[in-house]
Amino acid sequence: MVTRDGVGYVVHTPEMLEQGTEVELSVETVVREDSITLYGFLDETTRRLFVALNKVNGVGPVQSLSLLSQLGAGAVLAAITAKDLKGLTIAKGVGPKVAQSVLDNVNIAGLESEAIVVNPITESTRELAKTLAGLGWKIEQTEVAAQAAQAALPDGSESEQLRWAMARLRGDV
């Protein structure tokens, strides 16, 4: 709940925000026949990606928010750039049909270079990707898997992240 001038608003965000913390959000308003829903983002790139995802037939705000919540904007952009179907289907509520539609229809022109700012590839991500590549996977897939593993298990050990990334590459996650 966001309060502004004594009026409360419910704003859905992909990030967990601590209650009582003051943040500035870039807001996207989605108007439907039966509702007006607000979606808030900590940065403009994530909001623009949310809008691009929503333009795809069969993808709604809930699926878009699910992708951004679970993977982060950088991993979503990386998966779209690499045409990595499995990279998108790990998000809850996003099946192969929706993921393929996203890969075929999302225009990320102007957003690709911003992925580094939103979700930088860290040294630990590179090391995890190299380890996965050493096990036989293609490097384009391993970077996305490494980012997704670190997003899914931010406090996990390196071995836990490696197991998770391998399961994702096999299609088990």
Image (spheres, helix red, strand yellow):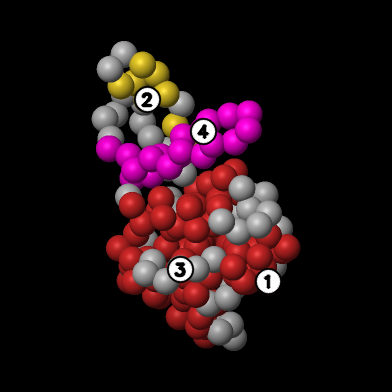
Q: How far apart are marks 4 and 2 (CA)?
A: 13 Å
Please give the residue where the numbered disc 4 appears in the rendered image.
37
Tag 2, which secondary structure? strand
Amino acid type at mark 2: Val
Closer to the observer: label 1 or label 2? 2
* Residue 137 sits in quarter: bottom right
The residue to which callout 2 is attached is 2
Lower position in the chain sequence, tag 4 or tag 3: 4
Cα distance between the residues tagged 3 and 2: 30 Å
> Which badge, 1 or 4, is on the more N-terminal residue?
4
Residue stretch rendered in magenta on the structure: 24-42
Q: Which of marks 1 and 3 is nearer the N terminus?
A: 3
93 sits left or right of 111 in the view: right
Q: Which of marks 3 and 2 is nearer the N terminus?
A: 2
Q: Which quadrant is the N terminus positioned in?
A: top left
Residue 108: which disc?
3
Label 3: which secondary element: loop
| Residue 170 marker | 1
Query: As drawn, which residue projects farthest toward the top?
Result: 6
Across and down, in percent, residue 5 comes to 28, 17
User: Which amino acid type is marked by label 1?
Assistant: Arg
- Callouts 1 and 4 close, C-beta under 8 Å: no
Kind of residue sitting beneath label 3:
Ile
Indicate the quadrant containing the C terminus: top left, top right, bottom left or bottom right: bottom right
Q: Is the magenta stretch mostly helix, strand or loop?
A: strand
Point out the tag, 4 or 2, that comes first from the N-terminus: 2
Q: Residue 52 magenta-drawn?
A: no
| Distance CA(mark 1)–CA(mark 3) | 27 Å
What amino acid type should be assigned to the residue bearing mark 4?
Answer: Thr
